[in-house]
């Protein structure tokens, strides 16, 4: 197999710039310590070779984790008073988000070597799929557009956390200690947000690879018609000479070998997708949980202010829509990947049967059996099945939860509960 050397056009250039910028951002946020290099004309990530560099990286990340542990809990503990049951629930939820954030960062640091291996596998599969399909590039215009949309949602959502990480009063009062602490918290939280966006990016890249493989098999099946039909049965529109028996035999063997190669790539793509899911499953769960909790807290505060007659701002409503869009976009991306992985099962591969040789039929049978055995699904920690059917479930859970939380908010606080308990005792 020859080395893949793609021609670069405008779309490919933008896609490469996006991926290179993401790699540099991961390096800058201390999420990756591997260097990007070329070995034997193949692009791959390489771990630091010198032992002293590894020790420095471990020491730096230990410092980051310790700072992270002390500063991140201050971000979400917006409710300091627990006078009502609803406030207590919100406080527990914000504390759980803090624990998730710290755990997510630590787990990513521990899994960096596995993540580097997965990235190298993706790079290798990209080149092999380009060679097999004859495509100059796989990332079409929708890749930079969709990621730009996701980046806009991420930056807009970050506007909610930024005032809590670095309050404006510290800057106005020139409180150097708190300003430095806020900048460190912003740096660490940017790493967490970047890591959550990597979940979306991994699903999207897998879906793109699956889509190109499915399209290639569909084209290959279309070309198989000339092999399957007899020379006398070719359409009158085809002015080419009828294929000889020998030529049909050669084409049949070539297509069977190509389908076997597709089966090998599908198997590797299935394994690397599962590896990516296993590495990031807690981050995916945190992604959904974090956006859902922030969404619920903002909606709860807005509705309570509205019911109490206080004029509420529209900013919480806009931020709620942004957080919901983040969840929906991740779920839709996972569903996109699953549907593209099922593309060959929708093609009439088993209908193309030739009377020349049974090799194509055997390859098709083996390929379809492999796809049935390697049915892709995104099940997070064995609980959540990420597909489009999960979106209505989230919406119904939000409405139900808000009704319960608002009911808690207007039933009084702990003092009222104690007063009722004393009245029951005296009566």
Image (cartoon, rainbow, N blue to C red):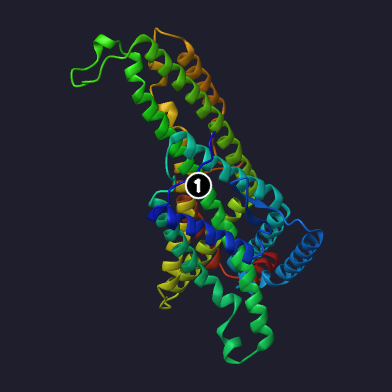
> Is residue 83 something that shows in the picture?
no
Q: Position of residue 227 (x, y in %)?
A: 35, 16
Which quadrant does the C terminus fall into? bottom right
Q: Position of residue 45 (x, y in %)?
A: 64, 52
From the image, which quarter does the N terminus lie in? top right
| Residue in front for this viewpoint, 419 or 297 | 297
Quadrant position of residue 320:
bottom left
Residue under the image location 21 percent in, 17 percent down: 235
**Residue at position x 42%, y 55% in the image:** 146
Q: Is residue 76 placed above or below 129 in the rendered structure?
A: below
Against 405, residue 131 (above or below) is above
Q: Residue furthest left?
A: 236
Does 52 sit above or below residue 41?
Answer: below
Asked whether 305 or 2 is in front, the reply is 2
Pinpoint residue 178: horizontal percent, then vertical percent.
66, 83
Task: Indicate the secondary structure of the residue bearing disc 1.
Answer: helix
Left or right of 393? Residue 30 is right
Pointer 1 local density, CA inside 10 Å: few below 14, some 14–19, many at least 20: some
Residue at 58% x, 66% y is 86
* Rendered location of residue 9, percent (x, y): 39, 53
Q: In the image as oriented, which residue stretches furthest toward the top?
A: 355
The mark total stands at: 1
Q: Is residue 282 visible?
A: yes
Residue 276 placement, left or right of 52: left
Residue behind mark 1: 205
């Amino acid at each position: 197999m020859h080395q893949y050397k793609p021609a670069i056009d405008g779309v490919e250039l933008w896609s490469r710039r996006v991926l290179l910028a993401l790699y540099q951002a991961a390096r800058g946020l201390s999420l990756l310590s591997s260097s990007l290099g070329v070995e034997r004309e193949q692009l791959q990530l390489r771990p630091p070779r010198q032992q002293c560099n590894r020790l420095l990286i471990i020491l730096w990340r230990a410092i980051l984790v310790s700072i992270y542990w002390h500063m991140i809990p201050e971000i979400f503990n917006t409710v300091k008073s627990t006078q009502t049951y609803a406030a207590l629930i919100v406080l527990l939820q914000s504390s759980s988000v803090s624990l998730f954030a710290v755990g997510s960062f630590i787990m990513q640091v521990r899994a960096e070597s596995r993540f580097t291996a997965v990235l190298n596998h993706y790079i290798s599969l990209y080149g092999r799929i380009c060679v097999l399909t004859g495509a100059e590039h796989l990332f079409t215009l929708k890749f930079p557009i969709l990621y730009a949309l996701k980046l806009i949602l991420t930056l807009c959502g970050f506007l909610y956390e930024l005032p809590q990480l670095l309050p404006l009063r510290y800057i106005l009062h020139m409180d150097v200690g708190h300003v430095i602490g806020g900048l460190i918290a912003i740096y660490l939280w940017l790493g967490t947000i970047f890591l959550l966006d990597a979940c979306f990016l991994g699903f999207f890249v897998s879906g793109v690879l699956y889509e190109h493989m499915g399209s290639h098999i569909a084209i290959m099946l279309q070309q198989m018609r000339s092999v399957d039909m007899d020379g006398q049965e070719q359409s009158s529109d085809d002015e080419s000479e009828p294929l000889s028996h020998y030529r049909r035999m050669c084409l049949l063997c070539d297509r069977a070998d190509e389908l076997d190669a597709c089966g090998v790539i599908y198997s590797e793509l299935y394994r690397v997708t599962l590896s990516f899911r296993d590495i990031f499953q807690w981050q995916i769960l945190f992604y959904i949980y974090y956006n859902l909790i922030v969404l619920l807290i903002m909606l709860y505060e807005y509705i309570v202010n509205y019911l109490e007659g206080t004029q509420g701002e529209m900013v919480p409503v806009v931020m709620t829509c942004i957080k919901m869009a983040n969840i929906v976009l991740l779920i839709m991306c996972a569903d996109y990947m699953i549907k593209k992985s099922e593309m060959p099962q929708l093609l009439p591969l088993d209908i193309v049967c030739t009377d020349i040789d049974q090799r194509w039929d055997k390859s098709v049978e083996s390929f379809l059996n492999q796809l049935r055995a390697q049915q892709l699904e995104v099940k997070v920690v064995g609980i959540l099945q990420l597909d489009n059917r999960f979106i209505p479930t989230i919406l119904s859970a939000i409405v139900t939860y808000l009704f319960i939380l608002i009911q808690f908010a207007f039933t009084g606080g702990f003092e009222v509960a104690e007063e009722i308990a004393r009245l029951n005792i005296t009566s």
